[in-house]
Image (spheres, rainbow, N blue to C red):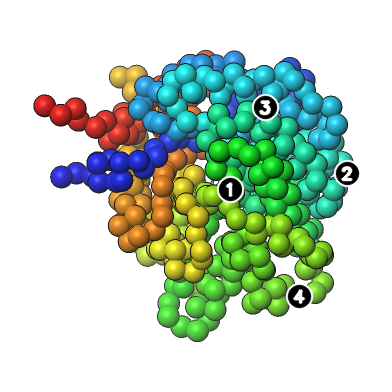
């Protein structure tokens, strides 16, 4: 019998995901002020196609049509992020009721369609005014985040099934402040590690504020995790893989789930760049969470000697290896090494150079294959005893792919940015059929 949702637990949650800056547009509407990504897009050379989020998928005006699309596919959950620059536009202080009203309507619209709202409180669009005061390098921003989180949760309440504090602290800290490919585009390891620590602190501060609201919503965080595989069994490759795993995964998993930074990586970094950890910070950061979101896309193939993957390896349009087995391996490892809450795959998906064919359809067979193989890997993990409770496809719509602008398409629904026409891709039609439970004869 081909893989079907019936192979999964009957209460396994199937959803799709987006993020505010990537789809909303309306960048200057209803009180929203600039985020660091508006600033970053305006810096020449930062975005490969020179684009920005001013219009994006115009979801701010087309949200009802987009929720109808989710419903038409039979998905029962939708993960989306709240734009801090709409809620408290200057980062601290005055609340913008029009911003809250937008998400209030969105949440009610989802519930009216039988779709569970799952909120990410921060998916990278920091108010620029806070960046002007040091951004996440400034410990005060952690406290501003907790205030913002409390404002959102007080308004949306437990209509929202889960609140994730952050999407991918590794991207917010390392990718954005050490590597420099994302906003604010710094290349400073000491700054990046200070950012990471303040995100861990902010997560803990926000958790405390949300717990105090006594919501029934699940509270957690979303981490991008990339399992590292040594290219060979030699000592140099195994050491390099352990380092990659430590810097990319354990530096974020351990503070949240163990209340400590991994010792080997702490020593590797050295005193010059280590963050200033104050008493109580890690106790706050490691408060119990109800769920951990895992964003998985591919593995890291680690070679100290520059060995590359073999001929015939499959890649997506991002140049990421298609490696579904890595999802199962990652989840089984998490289950082995950590005391886990409920797990959700909060992002998994692929970019391919999709086009609308003459028949008006988008025949994205590679994406369907990608999803099928990763669903199977997720099922393998469930059958291995991993507490995996759901899976969100990245992404509902083609959208603004950060430094790649609109040149990479991750959606299961195609967007023609010139007309804003949505076209359901073959992969979405496959997903709809996968989700259909045959009615008993
Ligand atoms: C290594 O991939 C990361 O885990 C990752 C991939 N992705 C992400 N994180 C972000 O959460 C999304 O906003 C991106 O659109 C999406 C696709 O690039």
Q: Give the vertical position of 62 relative to 201 (above or below).
A: above
Q: Position of residue 25 (x, y in %)?
A: 64, 23
The quarter of the displayed image where residue 132 is located = top right
Question: What whole-number distance in Å separates the C-alpha atoms at marks 2 and 3?
Answer: 27 Å
Q: Which numbered disc, 2 or 1, marks the residue that appears first in the sequence?
A: 2
Farthest residue to the right: give it: 133
- Which mark is drawn over residue 133? 2
Residue at the image position 52 percent from the left and 72 percent from the top:
241
* Secondary-structure class at tag 2: loop
Q: Which numbered disc, 4 or 1, marks the residue that appears first in the sequence?
A: 1
Q: Which numbered disc, 4 or 2, marks the residue that appears first in the sequence?
A: 2
Q: Label 3 near label 2: C-beta < 8 Å?
A: no
Q: Nearer the viewer, mark 1 or mark 3?
A: 3
Is the CB atom of the residue marked by disc 4 within 8 angstroms of ligand 1's nearest atom? no
Question: What whole-number distance in Å separates the C-alpha atoms at marks 2 and 1?
Answer: 27 Å
Q: Which residue is mark 1?
A: 220
Q: Nearer the viewer, mark 3 or mark 4?
A: 3
Question: What whole-number distance in Å separates the C-alpha atoms at marks 1 and 3?
Answer: 18 Å
Q: Which residue is mark 4?
A: 270
Q: Which numbered disc, 3 or 4, marks the residue that appears first in the sequence?
A: 3
Residue at the image position 74 percent from the left and 49 percent from the top:
205
Q: Which residue is mark 3?
A: 155
């Amino acid at each position: 019998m081909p893989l079907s949702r019936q192979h999964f637990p009957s209460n396994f949650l199937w959803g799709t995901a987006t993020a505010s800056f990537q789809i909303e547009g309306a960048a200057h509407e209803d009180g929203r002020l600039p985020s660091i990504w508006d600033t970053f897009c305006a810096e020449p050379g930062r975005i490969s196609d020179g684009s920005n989020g001013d219009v994006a998928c115009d979801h701010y005006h087309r949200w009802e049509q987009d929720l109808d699309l989710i419903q038409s596919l039979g998905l029962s959950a939708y993960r989306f992020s709240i734009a801090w620059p709409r809620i408290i536009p200057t980062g601290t202080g005055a609340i913008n009721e029009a911003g809250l009203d937008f998400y209030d309507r969105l949440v009610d619209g989802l519930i009216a369609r039988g779709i569970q709202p799952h909120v990410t409180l921060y998916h990278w669009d920091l108010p620029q005014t806070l960046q002007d005061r040091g951004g996440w390098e400034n410990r005060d921003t952690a406290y501003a985040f907790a205030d913002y989180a409390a404002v959102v949760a007080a308004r949306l309440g437990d209509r929202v099934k889960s609140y994730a504090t952050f999407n991918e602290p590794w991207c917010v800290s390392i990718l954005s402040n050490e590597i420099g490919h994302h906003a604010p585009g710094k290349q400073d390891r000491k700054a990046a590690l200070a950012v990471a620590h303040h995100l861990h602190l902010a997560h803990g501060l926000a958790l405390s504020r949300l717990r105090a609201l006594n919501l029934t919503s699940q509270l957690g965080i979303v981490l991008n995790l990339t399992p590292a595989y040594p290219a060979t069994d030699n000592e140099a490759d195994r050491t390099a893989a352990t380092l990659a795993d430590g810097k990319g995964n354990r530096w974020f998993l351990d503070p949240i789930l163990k209340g400590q930074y991994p010792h080997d990586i702490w020593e590797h970094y050295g005193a010059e760049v280590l963050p200033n950890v104050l008493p109580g910070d890690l106790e706050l950061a490691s408060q119990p969470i109800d769920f951990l979101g895992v964003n998985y896309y591919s593995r890291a193939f680690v070679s100290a000697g520059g060995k590359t993957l073999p001929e015939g390896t499959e890649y997506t349009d991002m140049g990421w290896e298609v490696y579904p087995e890595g999802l199962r391996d990652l989840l089984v490892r998490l289950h082995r090494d950590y005391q886990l809450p409920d797990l959700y795959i909060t992002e998994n998906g692929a970019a391919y150079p999709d086009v609308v064919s003459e028949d008006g359809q988008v025949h994205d067979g590679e994406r369907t294959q990608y999803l099928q193989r990763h669903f199977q890997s997720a099922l393998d993990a469930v059958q291995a005893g991993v507490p995996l409770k759901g899976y969100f496809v990245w992404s509902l719509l083609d959208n603004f792919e950060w430094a790649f602008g609109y040149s990479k398409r991750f959606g299961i629904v195609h967007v023609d940015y010139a007309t804003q026409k949505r076209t359901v891709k073959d992969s979405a039609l496959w997903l709809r059929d996968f989700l259909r439970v045959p009615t008993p004869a």
